[in-house]
């Protein structure tokens, strides 16, 4: 795999090559995940009819789906209602093996009316790590996490010496908590006046008060002890568990992971992703034929096998399917386990997901800059 420092060199090479090709031979690919540069490179190596050119920017923007700007967009938040209005119809791909094996709850996020506009490629899941097994089941429920954490607390002189868990420690947990209960962030903002957000915030604060004494005690504990990573605090016995993304867990060194036990967080309604990465073709692409060829190639199992083979050379850079598990159950029960056998107990099956929320284009920015600080 190409290290992140080498991705810039790859991008420069791809841009240089684009100067020697005609517009109809060029496929413009945009993503907010730098690893897509390697997919673009694989595509260029697989055929000689087209040259794919990659553009990467971090952050959230509506610009990538503006008509005529790019031919392919691979990004988080692509399934917002506003973005889907600006994407081409992909119903011709519904019968592909990949699309037919996408978990229904994830596939639904890319559909508007009867039109498939964004195809989910991967999903990020919240992982609970602890020093011992929390649940006998396949996943860990919120109630099991709560019971396990609450029995760990030690209070001395009105301060926490040890504590099990606090939602304030984990943006991943807080994000999945709200995603699980707010079906549409557009409705929440425009019609509900943040009523559900306020209710869910109050529930979290009440849990903290009941289990950790008070918000002030919880924050004082963090100020005193959490200057080192949570996984170290678990190993040292200071805290019982924490929640991080599946990619974060997968990229921890073996010297750490061998001392910890992971488990996927599942709410009562089912599994809830913290981000869905999808692919789409903007309306009026400059190269519609090339865009469709790239999209068909992207959905082939052999493409992801080549990608995972490349990734296996340096697993400390990214995890599996662009940082998450595949949106395809078939790939998760096949390719994923071949390259990541430790995922076998956790590979989701159809019917285990909850309804995924509709996330508006600018919502991640509002969430990160405005609402999350109010909760954390």
Image (spheres, helix red, strand yellow):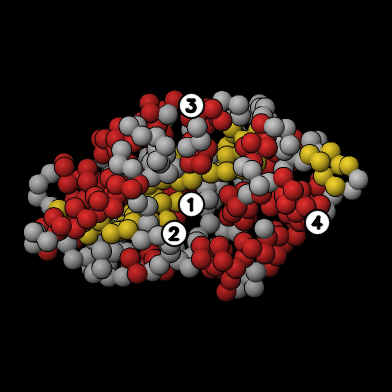
Check if mark 4's residue and mark 2's residue have beta carbons within 8 Å: no
Q: Earlier in the sequence, mark 4 or mark 3?
A: 4
Rendering coords of residue 205 (x, y %) = 76, 56
Secondary structure category for the residue under label 3: helix
Mark 4 neighbour density, 10 Å: few (under 14) some (14–19) many (20 or more):
few
Secondary structure category for the residue under label 4: helix
Mark 2 = which residue?
A: 77
Q: Earlier in the sequence, mark 1 or mark 2?
A: 2
Mark 1 vs mark 2, CA separation in Å: 8 Å
Q: Residue furthest right?
A: 157
User: Which label sits in the foreground, 2 or 3?
Assistant: 3
Q: Is the N terminus in the top left, top right, bottom left or bottom right quadrant? A: top left
Q: Is residue 342 at least partly visible in the picture?
A: yes
Indicate left or right for 17 with 175 as reference.
Answer: left
Residue 342: numbered disc? 3
Rendering coords of residue 245 (x, y %) = 53, 44
Indicate left or right for 170 with 104 as reference.
Answer: right
Answer above or below: position of 254 versus 144. above
Mark 1 = which residue?
A: 275
Check if mark 1's residue and mark 2's residue have beta carbons within 8 Å: yes
Residue 216: numbered disc? 4
């Amino acid at each position: 795999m190409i290290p992140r420092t080498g991705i810039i060199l790859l991008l420069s090479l791809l841009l240089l090559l684009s100067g020697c090709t005609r517009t109809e031979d060029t496929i413009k690919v945009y993503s907010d995940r730098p690893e897509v540069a390697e997919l673009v490179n694989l595509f260029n190596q697989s055929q000689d009819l087209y040259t794919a050119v990659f553009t990467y920017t971090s952050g959230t923007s509506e610009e990538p789906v503006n008509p005529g700007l790019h031919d392919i967009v691979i990004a988080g938040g692509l399934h917002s209602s506003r973005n889907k209005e600006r994407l081409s119809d992909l119903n011709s791909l519904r019968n592909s093996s990949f699309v037919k094996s996408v978990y229904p709850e994830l596939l639904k996020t890319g559909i508007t009316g009867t039109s498939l506009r964004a195809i989910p490629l991967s999903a990020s899941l919240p992982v609970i790590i602890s020093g011992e097994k929390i649940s006998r089941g396949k996943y860990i429920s919120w109630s099991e996490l709560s019971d396990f954490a609450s029995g760990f607390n030690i209070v001395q002189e009105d301060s926490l010496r040890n504590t099990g868990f606090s939602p304030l420690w984990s943006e991943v947990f807080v994000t999945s908590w709200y995603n699980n209960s707010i079906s549409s962030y557009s409705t929440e903002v425009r019609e509900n006046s943040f009523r559900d957000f306020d209710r869910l915030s109050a529930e979290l604060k009440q849990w903290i008060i009941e289990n950790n004494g008070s918000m002030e005690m919880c924050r004082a504990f963090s100020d005193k002890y959490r200057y080192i990573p949570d996984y170290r605090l678990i190993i040292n016995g200071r805290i019982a568990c924490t929640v991080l993304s599946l990619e974060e867990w997968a990229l921890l060194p073996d010297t750490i992971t061998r001392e910890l036990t992971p488990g996927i967080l599942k709410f009562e309604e089912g599994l809830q992703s913290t981000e869905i990465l999808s692919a789409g073709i903007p309306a009026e692409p400059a190269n519609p034929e090339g865009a469709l060829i790239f999209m068909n190639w992207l959905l082939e199992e052999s493409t992801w096998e080549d990608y995972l083979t490349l990734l296996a050379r340096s697993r400390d850079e990214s995890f599996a399917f662009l940082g998450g598990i595949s949106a395809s159950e078939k790939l998760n029960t096949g390719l994923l386990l071949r390259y990541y056998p430790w995922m076998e107990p956790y590979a989701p099956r159809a019917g285990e997901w909850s309804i995924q929320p509709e996330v508006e284009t600018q919502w991640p920015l509002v969430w990160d800059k405005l609402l999350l600080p109010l909760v954390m």
